[in-house]
């Protein structure tokens, strides 16, 4: 039996269960670190044919996208939206519970 990396295992999980992928990203948005969110997006990209395939679909530079989806990445909003769209996801804003009375 061949060992697989954590990234490969997560990509397979995200590919097999898109709802889990969306919930995982939402949890990271709520309670996680930005670096964790970017790594998860890279793993989801791997589940969708890899970063190069996503870069081609979004017309973004593949090398830049690898850097963007690294723990040190800092994506522009338009890049983030393009990547999410290519992955079949979208970003939604909801009021935080403690500020729900706005």
Image (spheres, grey):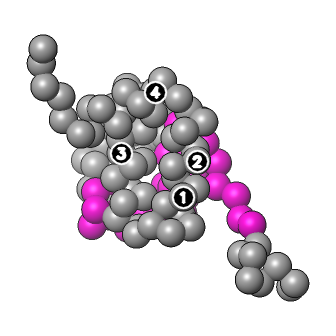
Check if residue 77 falls in the magenta segment: yes
Tell me if mark 2 has few (under 14), some (14-19) or many (20+) residues whose alpha carbon lies within 10 angstroms of its own: few
Instruction: Please tell me how crowded label 3 is: few (under 14), some (14-19), or many (20+) other residues with Cα within 10 Å.
Output: many
Alpha carbons under labels 3 and 4: distance apart:
12 Å
Q: Is residue 78 left or right of residue 49?
A: right
Categorize mark 4 by other alpha carbons within 10 Å: few (<14), some (14-19), many (20+): some
Picture quadrant where residue 4 is located = top left
Dot 3: what SS? Answer: helix
Q: Residue at x 56, y 67 (%)?
A: 30
Question: Residue 6: x percent and y percent?
Answer: 24, 39
Give the CA distance from mark 2 to mark 4. 13 Å
Locate residue 1, reporting x and y percent: 12, 14
Q: Residues under labels 1 and 2: Cα distance?
A: 6 Å
What number is the disc on residue 27?
1
Residue 45 lies, with reference to residue 4, above or below; the image says below
Q: Nearer the viewer, mark 1 or mark 3?
A: 1
Label 2 belongs to which residue? 23
């Amino acid at each position: 039996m061949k060992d697989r990396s954590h990234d490969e295992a997560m990509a397979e999980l995200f590919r097999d269960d898109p709802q889990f992928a969306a919930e995982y990203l939402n949890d990271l948005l709520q309670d996680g670190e930005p670096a964790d969110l970017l790594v998860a997006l890279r793993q989801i990209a791997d589940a969708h044919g890899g970063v190069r395939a996503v870069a081609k679909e979004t017309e973004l530079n593949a090398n830049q996208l690898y850097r963007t989806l690294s723990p040190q990445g800092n994506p522009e909003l338009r890049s983030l939206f393009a990547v999410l769209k290519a992955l079949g996801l979208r970003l939604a804003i909801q009021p935080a519970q403690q500020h729900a009375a706005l």
